[in-house]
Image (cartoon, rainbow, N blue to C red):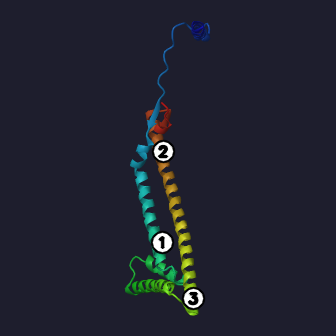
Amino acid sequence: MKKFILTSLCLALLVGGGASRSAVAAPAPAALPIGYVDLEQIVPKSTAYQTEQASVAQLTKDLEATLQGEAQVALLPEGDRTQYQSLKAKTAPNDGEKKQITDLEGRNKQLLDELQMLQTVQAPDDKQKARLKELTDLYNEAQDRIQKRKRDLQKQIDDRAKQSMAKVQDAITKAIEEVARAQGLLMVIDKTARLY
């Protein structure tokens, strides 16, 4: 049975070309001009990647500093927090502005110290209970605001990282296309797409 299938396959190959073809084997086709890249090696070494990573790292550092600054005055009223942020944003605050920054941070610390002290009172009177509730509510609102702000800032960082990777991929793709055209390659495949 094997002999029959093998003979049939050989006859089909010989006859399949039609009567006009000779029984001489056709030359093997030339190798396809295909390029091969290893993006896992290329991407981290690319200038575009390193530039974008540095940009995202700087954004992260700046946003973390912003969040830390906001936490320094979290218990203060909104107007005071806004004033504090504008003072902290100055590259070279004068002595008066430095004093305002220190005063605002000091007021926030006083509120925190008062809250901690009231939390340790064994038998608070009505006035102390009311102040403890007021400060606790203020503290909880501040924590909620900081957590929301933290999520917003993290989203900014994540969005920037995605944009950066898109820029890097575009730059690398363009470079690969240029080299492929110059080398006359039909296609370029990545190491991860290679099956054999």
Q: Is 11 situated above or below 48? A: above
Considering only order in the chain, which callout, 2 or 3, is on the residue closer to the N terminus? 3
Considering only order in the chain, which callout, 1 or 2, is on the residue closer to the N terminus? 1
Considering only order in the chain, which callout, 3 or 1, is on the residue closer to the N terminus? 1
Disc 1 secondary structure class: helix
Q: How crowded is mark 2: few (under 14 residues within 10 Å), some or many (20 or more)?
A: few
Label 2 vs label 1: CA separation? 38 Å
Q: Is 164 situated above or below 125? A: above
Q: Residues within 10 Å of mark 3 (few under 14, many from 20)?
A: some
Residue 138: percent from the left, percent from the top? 56, 81
* Quarter of the view holding residue 183: top left
Image mark for residue 47 = none
* Quarter of the view holding residue 68: bottom left
* Circles 1 and 3 in contact, beta carbons < 8 Å: no
State the residue at coordinates (49%, 82%).
Answer: 83
Q: Report the amino acid beneath label 1.
A: Leu
Label 1 vs label 3: CA separation? 31 Å
Mark 3 highlights which residue? Answer: 129
Image mark for residue 67 = 1
Q: Report the amino acid beneath label 3.
A: Lys
* Quarter of the view holding residue 20: top right
Q: Report the amino acid beneath label 2.
A: Lys
Q: Residues within 10 Å of mark 1 (few under 14, many from 20)?
A: some
Mark 2 highlights which residue? Answer: 174
